[in-house]
C-alpha cells in the first residue's frame, strides 16, 4: 500500500534519467520512473522526503497537501488526476488508521 502512495523505485538500475524505457513498475504505477526522466531528481527526492515524514508519524501535513492538490485538480476538471489523488488520499488515511489501531493495541498490552 505504501508503494501506491509513495511510488519509490526498487530496481537496481543506474539512474541517469536517459533510459529509453522504464521498467514494469512504472507501467503499473509503483514507480515514478526517474530512470527515463519522468520526474527529475528534486521531485523524486521530495517524494522520498514525504515518505520518510509519513513513516515518522508526520502524516497530517502530507495528507493536507495532497487534499489541496486533489481539490485543485477537480476544480481544473482534471478528473483522472483527481481520481488518482483521491485514491492516494484514501490509501494514506487507511494506513494512518491502521497505525492508530496498532498503537492503541500495543498501548493496552503494556498497561
Image (cartoon, rainbow, N blue to C red):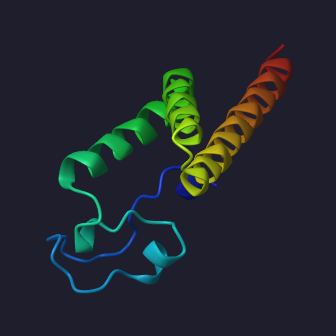
Where 73 sits versus 61, above or below?
A: below
| Residue at 56%, 22% in the rendered image | 60
Where 36 sits versus 64, above or below?
A: below
* Residue 57 visible in rendering: no
Q: Where's residue 46, x and y in %?
A: 31, 41
| Residue at 76%, 37% in the rendered image | 98
Looking at the figure, which quarter contains the C terminus? top right
Looking at the figure, which quarter contains the N terminus? bottom right
Q: Where's residue 5, x and y in %?
A: 55, 50
Where 86 sits versus 11, above or below?
A: above
Q: Nearer the viewer, residue 50 or 43?
A: 43
Q: Quadrant of residue 103?
A: top right
| Residue at 20%, 81% in the rendered image | 19
Tell which residue pokes out farthest to the top in this image.
111
Q: Where's residue 37, x and y in %?
A: 22, 67
| Total residue callouts | 0
Q: Is residue 44 left or right of residue 93?
A: left
Q: Where's residue 23, x and y in %?
A: 39, 82
Amino acid at each position: 500500500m505504501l508503494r501506491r502512495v509513495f511510488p519509490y523505485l526498487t530496481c537496481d538500475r543506474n539512474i541517469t534519467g536517459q533510459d529509453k524505457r522504464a521498467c514494469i513498475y512504472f507501467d503499473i504505477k509503483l514507480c515514478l520512473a526517474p530512470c527515463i526522466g519522468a520526474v527529475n531528481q528534486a521531485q523524486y527526492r521530495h517524494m522520498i522526503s514525504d515518505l520518510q515524514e509519513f513513516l515518522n508519524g508526520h502524516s497530517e501535513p502530507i495528507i493536507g497537501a495532497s487534499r489541496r492538490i486533489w481539490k485543485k485538480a477537480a476544480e481544473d476538471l482534471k478528473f483522472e488526476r483527481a481520481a488518482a489523488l483521491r485514491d492516494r488520499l484514501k490509501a494514506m488515511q487507511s494506513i494512518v488508521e491502521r497505525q492508530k489501531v496498532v498503537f492503541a493495541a500495543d498501548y493496552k498490552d503494556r498497561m
